[in-house]
Amino acid sequence: MATDLSGMHEDYQSIKVFDFPFHPLVLALANAFFRFERWRKCRHANPELSIEKFNITSGDGRQVPVIAMTPRNLIGQSSPVVIYYHGGAFALGWASMHHLNCQRYALEGGATVLLVGYRLTPANPFPAPFEDCYAALEWVHANAEQKGFDLTKIATMGDSAGGCLTAAVAQKAADEGKPLAATVMIYPALDSDCKTTSAVEFTNTPIWSANSNRRMWELYLKNVPADSNPKYASPAHRQNLTGQPPAYIETAEFDPLRDEALIYATALEAAGVAVERNETKGTIHGFELAADNPIVEDSMQRRCEYLKRVLA
């Protein structure tokens, strides 16, 4: 039975419902479009930011592109760090929206933001994307003195599939004695079981559907045996969340990922972790596409204020 979408904000009601086609040609065309849009919208640097592009080395020796965005008023000072993992179903590179949002997080959050270009599926399933993302945290620790990073003020942040990677990196960081100041998860993908109410029933929601969600996990975990549960693959499967960093968790009302994010927030709270929730209403997955929507602006302000507070 189709989900009742009558409570959806008018900005999203005209968006076509479809199941995302994870076809190699479609992904290649989409990523080519994203590269063009990044060039078109992001080629002129914000004068308030110092922007540096470089590669870091992942655990298996692969080179991972990173864009560092540092407010000019922090140059020469000890800087908090936000490591950002973009969304895109583990299969799409960062969009211009990610790049522009990260600039705002840097300026209003008062931190150096690292936008990490991790390897993508279907060619690079788990654990490759996760290893690239954790390598970014290791790079921050290894280069803290040279770059002026404050290791007591590191946050991981991400949206959608990037929210999965954000939570997974936070879990491993706690396991390996590299505690984070906070995590920020924006409509995150956290549970590969896809059995929550929203993950089952939201088959006709714009941008992201239950069917697309299942296919995303199949491709991300295609090398993982069905009866195994490897660490850091599906963050919601972790039994003990004690010691996880404070978290900001944001959800969209008409999103298959909604319930797993709320369940994870509750599990964190039960483990004694401070959680700030932002349960947006009338929204869909990726709702920032309506840039002038007041819900979007409110959420952007909340994210920036949270970063500024926890990294102060």
Image (cartoon, rainbow, N blue to C red):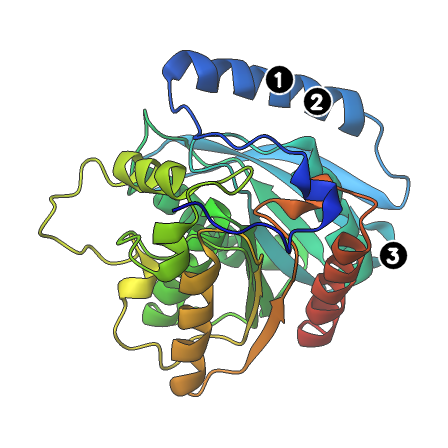
Instruction: Tell me which corner region of the image, top left, top right, bottom left or bottom right, holds residue 65.
Output: top right
The dot on residue 66 is: none
Q: Secondary structure at mark 3?
A: helix
Name the residue type under label 2. Answer: Glu
Mark 3–mark 1 CB contact (< 8 Å): no
Q: What distance separates the C-alpha of mark 3 from that of mark 2?
A: 28 Å
Label 2 belongs to which residue?
Answer: 37
Q: Residue 245: image x %, image y %?
A: 49, 75
Is there any visible trace of residue 213 in the rendered image?
A: yes
173 or 227: nearer the eye?
A: 227
Q: Residues within 10 Å of mark 1 (few under 14, many from 20)?
A: few
Instruction: Tell me which corner region of the image, top left, top right, bottom left or bottom right, holds residue 272.
Output: bottom left
Mark 3–mark 2 CB contact (< 8 Å): no
Query: In the visual, does 264 lie left or right of 125?
Result: right
Label 1 belongs to which residue?
Answer: 33
Label 3 belongs to which residue?
Answer: 73
Is there any visible trace of residue 77 in the rendered image?
A: no
Mark 2–mark 1 CB contact (< 8 Å): yes
Query: In the visual, does 304 lie left or right of 6?
Result: right
At 78% from the left edge and 61% from the top edge, which residue is drawn? 298
Name the residue type under label 1. Answer: Phe
Q: What distance separates the C-alpha of mark 3 from that of mark 1?
A: 34 Å
Residue located farthest toward the right when viewing the structure as drawn: 47
Q: Residue 108: image x %, image y %?
A: 81, 59
Query: In the visual, does 311 lie left or right of 24?
Result: right
Sequence order check, earlier mark of 3 and 1: 1
Q: Residue 80: image x %, image y %?
A: 68, 64
Looking at the image, residue 134 lies above or below residue 167: above
96 or 84: nearer the eye?
A: 96
Q: Secondary structure at mark 1?
A: helix
Name the residue type under label 3. Answer: Asn
